[in-house]
Amino acid sequence: MLNSFHKILWFLMLAVVFCSISFAQDARETSNESSELPVRLNYQTQYFEGGEDILFDNGPLVNLPGGGAGGADASVLQSTSLLMTTIGFGHQQNLFNYMVDDFEATASWSVDSIKFYAYQTGSTTTSTITGIYLQIWNGPPNAGGTVVWGDTVTNRLAATRWSGIYRVTETTLTATNRPIFEVVANVAGLNLSAGTYWLEWGMTGSLASGPWAPPITIAGQNTTGNGLQRLSGVYNPANDGGSLTQQGLPFIVHGTSGAPTGPGPATNPSPANGATNVPITASQATWTNPAGATSNEFYFGTAPGSLTLLQSGSLATSFNIPPGTLQYASTYYWRVNEIDGSGTTIGPIWSFTTEQNPLLVQDTLDVYPQNLDYWTGTSNTTAKTDVSEVRTLRPELGWMVFDVSAIPASATILSSSFNAYVNANNWPWWSVTPMGAVNPITADAATIYAQADANTATGVAYVFSNEGGTLPLGWINRPMGNTANPDLQAALSQGWFAVGVVDRDVDTYFINFDGWNQPNKPYLTVVYEYIIPVELTSFTAAAVNDKVTLNWSTATETNNQGFFVERSNGNEFASVGFVDGKGTTTEVQNYSFTDAGIAAGSYTYRLKQVDFDGTFEYSSTIEVEVLAPREFALNQNFPNPFNPSTMISFSLLVDAKVSLKVFDILGQEVMTIVNNNLSAGAHEYTFDASNFNSGVYFYRIEATGVDGQNFTSVKKMILTK
């Protein structure tokens, strides 16, 4: 039980930091840190500065230059925009945890030092790193490599200092508890021939937390390399815990290079190095070869440290990019190695970034409870005690359900915040909690209470707040963290999202909020983005005789394979045709489909729009009435003149015995098309004249209705070959 004494004691204990050894530091486990409402950041990936003694730079760490506390650079975990959660990887040498990543020596190298990066949570900007232990492999350590230099027991620390960078998350941009340190390993006397090598390193520090290795950080990219993490002797991909994508580790190799081999590097890359807004339809990468080159190799990939060889064996000047390879808003890296009789020149790594998806829309929406009982309310363990107001004085707790049906089900939630009006409180320590699949509108009191009360802890609750005293009455806003955004995203398909509201004390402390039928309804502010789907702007149908013509238009299309046209006459819908779509386009597209030979009656049509990945959605339905003929009639064939076939149509007022024959210019019968009993309505038949000579022909109908009516008609048609 918490009381006033405990709350006073809590303030005295704020300076105490609790840390534990872990394999990876996860943003979800640090959500109780002070945070700010996440915003869409203007990221700018900043690469480390080069120098004459830099032989290799494995990748950037800063993606928000000057955006950290006090104007320092920030390495921002893209926790909201890319759902990443790993702030840093554990590489505690004393626990036998290590990081592994590769580099390529482009010639004979004399290496004097290698710079790494690490932090210990809770440190100041005075480095707390006490050791670095390093060994080098001539191949992947988990795939046949052998150690060619170093070991994991010799401390090779030469220097360490603050790098001027803070490691933060998108909800803690100005945090200062993770200053990143440069850690320089002394490897004087290390000589490497040209080839690919793998570094394996671990560190020690003076604090209990970590040391942690921050991964390569690139704006808008969740895969940054092919790093490994060694835990208990086992090498596994260094995957982010949220996006489950592999990461690279930043390091810089310093030294001098021997004389290069090969004919020299390729030049004049297209797309140009650093190009942006490259269309995803780009079909080629091209370059200029140096004089004397006899062959070359083309490498391509999404991470500079893990390019894939795609073309070799000839002297090429281009590579054809397969359709569908390039995705929107993605950075790609490529390199051309040039070869002659003296050896290979390892080319520079070039990059380009593709265009943003023109159909990507970002929006902000406030979502509210519906104006119905129990969309907000209060409960104890045995009964629901209020249909609207949200109270938390034990033994009561509250809940809120928000109508999220206006947010597209395909949307990605970028951020969410809780907004509610405090109408009474007493020094609350309270939480907004996940309700999972529990729907408080229909669930019983015991189920609601158990779910809300079980998820109040830091690291679990969407909002975990220890107020410093009694709050002034009025509106409050709290950003929602932990799993709030993915949980909300998963709830979009059901149209509602529920949260519990709980004061964690069990005595006189509480916080109460207005509900759906009080003056100030609670709401969530949701920032989300989505791809505009196929946007149908019109859908019409018109019946002429026995034909129904459907017309529709789209304003935009994304990945649209096409439309199945489906028809129902009161039973299940059945497909009657398919019309190809236009893929992805922002231009207006018009479509038409004719459903012919339809008997009189009422029909309902709809479109089933299908994407190339198999997903689909239905349009609204449209009804049309096909009227029964009001007379016997023989229509002019179409087309006319024709070659070699034409369509002959007629209508019957009543059921009738029908004879439809074709005659030549001399009056001789050349074909009987129909000689049968037919039902009232419209009919059409194809006359195929492939075996007839050009000339004038006549077709005649004779119909005897079941009511005794007789109908005869003759029309002329011309066959032109």
Image (spheres, rainbow, N blue to C red):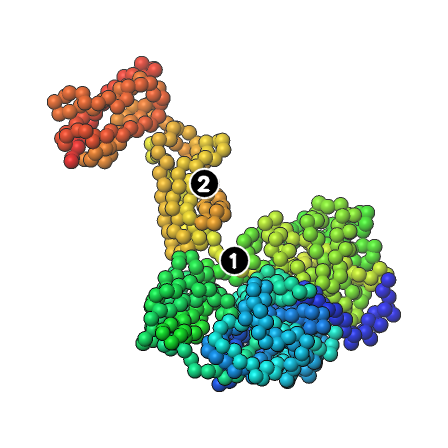
Q: How far across and how far down the image is residue 4, in percent?
A: 86, 68
Q: Residue at x 85, y 64 (%)?
A: 2
Give whichever of 432, 401 is nearer the camera: 432
Q: Nearer the viewer, mark 1 or mark 2?
A: 1
Q: CA distance from mark 1 to mark 2?
A: 25 Å
- Which of the 4 image quadrants contains residue 335? bottom left
Measured from the top left, where is residue 541 in percent x and y? 39, 40
For residue 530, which numbered disc appears in the image? 1
**Residue 259 seen by the camera:** yes
Looking at the picture, does residue 300 appear above or below residue 539?
below
Name which residue lies at 57% across and 74% down: 148
Residue underneath mark 2: 606
* Residue drawn at point x = 48 percent, y = 44 percent: 618
Q: 617 left or right of 413?
A: left
Which numbered disc, 1 or 2, marks the residue that appears first in the sequence?
1
Q: Quadrant of residue 459?
A: bottom right
Q: Secondary structure at mark 2?
A: strand
Amino acid identity at mark 1? Tyr
Residue 134: x %, y % from top left:
62, 76
Any part of residue 541 in sight: no
User: Could you say where residue 602 lies in the image, as x and y percent from the top left?
Assistant: 43, 31
Three-letter amino acid code of the residue under disc 2: Arg
Residue plotted at (84% across, 72% down)? 8
> Left or right: 10 with respect to 354?
right
